Image: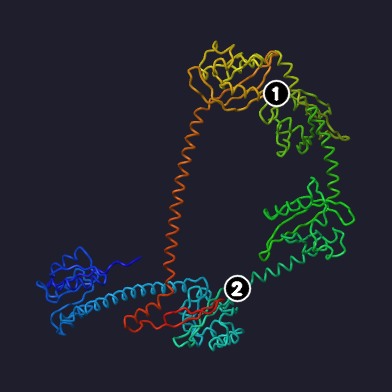
Amino acid sequence: MPSAPTRILIVEDDAGLAELFDELLTKDGALCAHVESGRLCLDWLASRQADLLLIDYSLPDLLAPALVEVLRETGRLPPFIIVTGHGDERVAVAMMKLGARDYLVKDNLVLDRLPSVVKRTLQELDNERRLAASEAALRAETQRADQYFENAAVMMLVLDREGRVQRINQAGCEILGLPPAEVLGRNWFDYFIPQKNRDGVREIFHRLMAGQLDQTRHAEHPVLNRAGEERLLAWHNSLIRDDTGAITGVLGSAEDITDRHQAEAAQREHEAFRKRVFESSQMPIIVMEAHSYRYIDCNPAAVAIYHCASRAELLGHTPMDFSSPVQYDGTPAPIKARFYIERSLAEGRIVFEWLHQRADGELWDAEVHLMSFTSNDRRFLQFTLQDITERRRAAAALRHHREMLARTEHLAQIGSWEWDSSTDTVRWSAELFRLFQRNPAEGAPSFAEQAKLYLPEDMQRLKAAVAATLSQGTPYELELRGVRGDGMIRVYLASGHSEQGPDRPAVRLFGALQDITERVITLQALKESEEKFATAFRASPVPMAIRDLGTDQYVDVNDRCLALMGYVREEIVGHAPLEIGWMAPEDRERNRHALSANGIVTDRELHLRRKDGTEVICSYSTHIIQIGGRPCVLSTSIDVTERRRAEAQLHQRMEELKRSTAELQASNEELTRFNRAATDRELRMIELKQEINDLCRQAGQAPRYALGFIETRDDSPPTQAPLLA
């Protein structure tokens, strides 16, 4: 981006000369303005700024010294050059003391000298500005370096050639347990290195100072803290050199690794213990690679369970070499193995059963505990085996017996139970859980808790019968009204008998429970069903209607349905939905096909038309019922119009939220770009010190800084970072 032109204000009462100055300076790219007096100069600078002033020494109203003082007092004095018709050196010296950048005499050479004097002055001003900026940046960088030294989480230590402590940070003082005043100036080796390590560490230091030792070398040695305890530190050292390159000291950074070292020692001991446990365990243990599935380690118990002669017969193989080709569910073993391995890698630990095959073709079952772990950035799998062949056979036989019993109970709707009265422990068959609609995982309720399963008066009858059975051994058979888990009342035929030992009362009861609700309901339904149905139908808060399945004409509608449709009963009964325009023909046809195929239509959303022509959205359900031996269709129509409108409004608001989110994301991306640009500007810091000396040389001045160097430790080729000596 091109820089702005230099703004020069010419303060000259000679208009012709000022015009010549303007012409010369404008050719060099300057932007010039002209005033003829000191007062006009003050007015001009009150509202504008100039980069440079050309001031005639003798103005009509003010001499240049007075004008300069006024501008300095008001804080508006830019750099200035004095132009005078007198060649008096005293005037020149006085103006230079007031801050003039240069001095020009109005002679026949003034027009030749003016451009070079202005150019040189502007160059000096630019160099000074850049120098000031560089010095400020250097101060900030130096301050940051000091802050890093002081705030580093590791010990930072500077020793001179004699090994005396020149500087130490807070972390170092905390490791030593001493304030800086008790560390600075002391010989590091005499005060802070244990006696047994002192000579060796001092020798390393002397070799470093002599340049005989690679400074990038990592070292570990202990130090003594205030309490006399040894703390093990990991050291990294960098040499400090003066301007001539001579070594003047060393900068060391040290991390306290005492706890880590102790933890590593404990870990090694733990690993040795684990190895002993691994080898001596009676549980077969195998370790394999996660990427190849190959066995890389196993214990003697694993060799034995596979019927191998040695570890060599097992290692290098994969699970496929010892598996049945097909697993329990018919899946090929390689596919099933990959499934379990991927699960273990994702979840960490799984348990499953696996069908194995030995070299002689013998099949055997195992319970596998498979887990994944990482070591040295590599993934491994470890599993243990337990031979469950006999357990699976026994479980299969028991499962077959129970399945037969469960099928029998289910067909007869009979559940069985047993009760130990001494512990109030009750066991139910699966069918009994189903009859009461209870979750088997919750277990059977104790006899004391069974009051909630029956109506109160029926529970009293059951308690009396059970008491008689326990005391007298009398079997019982009762009809009881029970309450299922879903709240429904069912009628059960309950029977029970006791198990009695010699010369002692019964403590265990066995029995069965059969659901006879349908039989009881059937006997009552012939008389009561139509009346109850009619009452429930008319009183229902849900709009309901009944149509003849054959003619599709309405047989009856309840009041809520009439209110929804906007008709009176006489306008509905005897007519079909299509006749009154309640339902569109295509919806009627789809409902008819669904009802014919499934016997029921559930929660189908339809647009229905009321008598006044308005449209309502309804959740429409139908199913086939029998009334007086005649097949009919019972339908419900629940008005969901307002709910759909609310959902549409919610959808609109969600779309607005998405747009707002997108705008916020765009703002965040813009902020990220700004931060990146700010970071780039900071990268120039490392070049600033050299630039300061270069700028001083360009200005004809001696370099302001003497530069020394600290060699930094790095695995890359050596580099030198300039530091303030």
The residue under label 2 is 258
- Return the x and y of residue 229 as percentages of the image width and height: 58, 77
Q: Secondary structure at mark 2?
A: helix
The residue under label 1 is 457
Specify the quadrant that holds the N terminus.
bottom left
The foreground one among 616 and 303 is 616
| Distance in Å between CA atoms under marks 2 and 1 | 77 Å
**The quadrant where residue 576 appears:** top right
| Mark with earlier residue (2, 1) | 2
Q: Secondary structure at mark 1?
A: helix
Q: Eyeballing the image, is 115 above or below 593?
A: below
**The quadrant where residue 544 appears:** top right
Q: Is residue 328 left or right of residue 237?
A: right
- Return the x and y of residue 414 as percentages of the image width and height: 79, 28
The foreground one among 143 and 150 is 143
- Residue type at mark 2: give it: Thr
- Return the x and y of residue 385 as percentages of the image width and height: 80, 55
The foreground one among 451 and 18 is 18
Q: Residues within 10 Å of mark 1 (few under 14, many from 20)?
A: few
Q: Is residue 328 left or right of residue 564?
A: right
Q: Residue at x 47, y 71 (%)?
A: 151
- Residue type at mark 1: give it: Glu
Specify the quadrant that holds the C terminus.
bottom left
Q: Residue at x 53, y 74 (%)?
A: 175
Q: How many marks?
A: 2
